[in-house]
Image (tube, grey):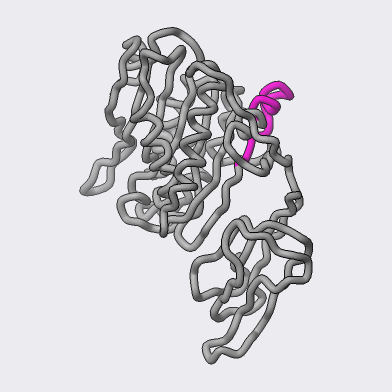
Amino acid sequence: MNVEDALSKRGEKSYGFIEVGRTSVSTYRIPVVVIAGAKSGKTVGFLGGTHGTEYASIEGLIRATKELDPSEMSGNVIAVTILNGPHFEHRSAFLSPIDQLNQNRQFPGDPEGTLSKRTAHVVFQEVVSRCDALVDLHGGDIGEDIDSMVIAGGGGGEEVEKMAIDMACCFPTEYVSQLPASVSGLTMTAQKEYGIPCVTSEAGTPYPVRERHIQFHYEGVMNILRYFKVLPGEPTLANAALNPKGYRIKASNAGIWHGFHELGSRVKKGERVGEITDLFGNVLESHKAPEDAKVTFLRTFYSVNHGEALIGLTVID
């Protein structure tokens, strides 16, 4: 696909692929949807599958791009529905099975690098450079379960940072975390690279893919398009807490993890949230909530090693 040509086709929706790199026996391409609105306006970029097993975010984006009608749009959408083909294809956790790199640490990429770096370069050059705003849709990878939240990019100036927070609040979220401008390697480095507001949504787990998490991503996509007036109607902005206090409890011992609470549940200060046992069922360590909080991250693996994350708690009123 030639993205520039597709953008010139007013009132049309175009589907295609862009080659990002090759291995000894395979050619990897990213699937791209370009929706050129009947009227001119902002261009918003969406990335799905930067981590290829974060399925709720991928499904939410695919549903949105399928539903969008260019005749009703004033502006454009450029969407990469599955950015990380090897990760998606091989169902591997966190790292590409091709070069063992985390795709979301490689931006803005390198045209002479390995596949993950080349993919990052192509996405920034062919997609992100043409956008007025960027949304990267994520969730829990294999072994993780993440409740609905959004990260806003840092840098690019006060106005751009404020716009990123507004974009984050276009998702039906209870809280937003804003990254410092110094963070590098993520898709949100586009905020400094191109001076455009960027957000990353987080919701879901690979198994099961919950409808409420799909809807979280879908609603955010559609609402952001209203925010930029690509779609008609007024956006609904969540009254979200900004940078609330959070706790990520990690394992001091290795063994078997037993979590006591469901994702999204509320816990009281001092309430037991889980324990690690040895391979004979003897308790090695027990954890309690340090404050009244909401369970926003869960480890879904049964086995646990030293230093690994067990549960995430966020202090939200």
Classify 191 as above or below 107: above
Residue 1, position as x, y percentages in the image? 28, 24
Nearer to the camera, 35 or 130: 35
Residue 155 lies within the magenta run: yes
On the image, which quarter does residue 160 sit in? top right
Residue 144, position as x, y percentages in the image? 51, 60
Identify the residue at the far left of this view. 25
Q: Is residue 232 left or right of residue 19?
A: right
On the image, which quarter does residue 296 sit in? bottom right
Nearer to the camera, 69 or 2: 69
Q: Which residues are magenta?
A: 150-164
Classify 108 as above or below 102: above
Q: Is residue 290 left or right of residue 252?
A: right
Classify 150 as above or below 131: below
Residue 148, position as x, y percentages in the image? 57, 47
Q: Identify which residue is drawn at 32% across, 39% down.
A: 21
